[in-house]
Image (spheres, grey):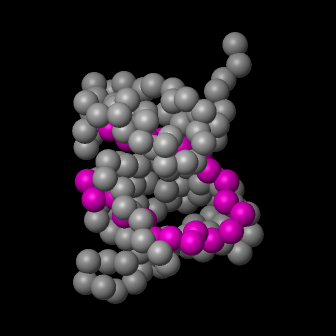
Amino acid sequence: MIGTDLSSCPIHLGLQASAQAEPPYTGTADWYEAYGKRHEADGYEGRLMSLHAFAESWPVWEMHPHGSEVVLCTGGRFVIHQELSDGSLRTIELEAGQYAINDAGIWHTFDLEAPATALFVTAGWGTQHRPR
């Protein structure tokens, strides 16, 4: 048996310590909408675990209003910028094997100097984006 590629098929971590392989990831709004519908019953407690490769900095800010997000650098190096509730900015530099937590309600974005990969465990319910 061959394992499943996490960068292609994320995992939903659900209620009662369940885990479910997701359909192939497309990165589109439709994929996220279908994901939300599949796991609506898990509400705020569901988590999406995914692995992404990045070649450039994010063009947007992102915020998860209902739960924290764990970000683990698995390759390369990147910087997370967090906009705290008082309006101040915090910068966290990550290298392979290091992680950061984006608390619920904290806007965040990423900067890269070279390609990098990261594992995300996200409380995605109600995720919001805004231009950078």
Q: Nearer the viewer, residue 132 or 28?
A: 28
Q: Which residues are magenta?
A: 46-66
Q: Residue furthest front?
A: 30
Q: Is residue 57 above or below residue 46?
A: below
Q: Nearer the viewer, residue 46 or 40?
A: 40
Q: Is residue 27 visible?
A: yes
Q: Residue at x 39, y 83 (%)?
A: 89
Q: Quadrant of the N terminus?
A: top right
Residue 56 magenta: yes
Q: Is residue 35 above or below residue 103?
A: above
Q: Residue at x 67, y 60 (%)?
A: 54
Q: Residue furthest top?
A: 1
Q: Is residue 23 above or below residue 33?
A: above
Q: Is residue 97 visible?
A: no
Q: Residue at x 37, y 49 (%)?
A: 124
The reply, left or right, for residue 131 in relation to residue 112 is: left
Question: Quadrant of the rendered structure where residue 76 is?
Answer: bottom right
Task: State the image coordinates of residue 91 (x, y, percent, origin top left).
Answer: 48, 79
Q: Nearer the viewer, residue 50 or 131?
A: 131
The reply, left or right, for residue 47 in relation to residue 94 is: left
Task: State the image coordinates of residue 22 (x, y, percent, origin top left).
Answer: 51, 30
Residue 109 magenta: no
Question: Quadrant of the rendered structure where residue 17 is?
Answer: top left
Q: Residue furthest right?
A: 114
Q: Nearer the viewer, residue 94 or 24?
A: 24
Task: State the image coordinates of residue 104 (x, y, percent, origin top left).
Answer: 29, 60
Marker count (numbered): 0
Q: Residue at x 66, y 23 (%)?
A: 3
Task: State the image coordinates of residue 41 (x, y, percent, origin top left).
Answer: 25, 30
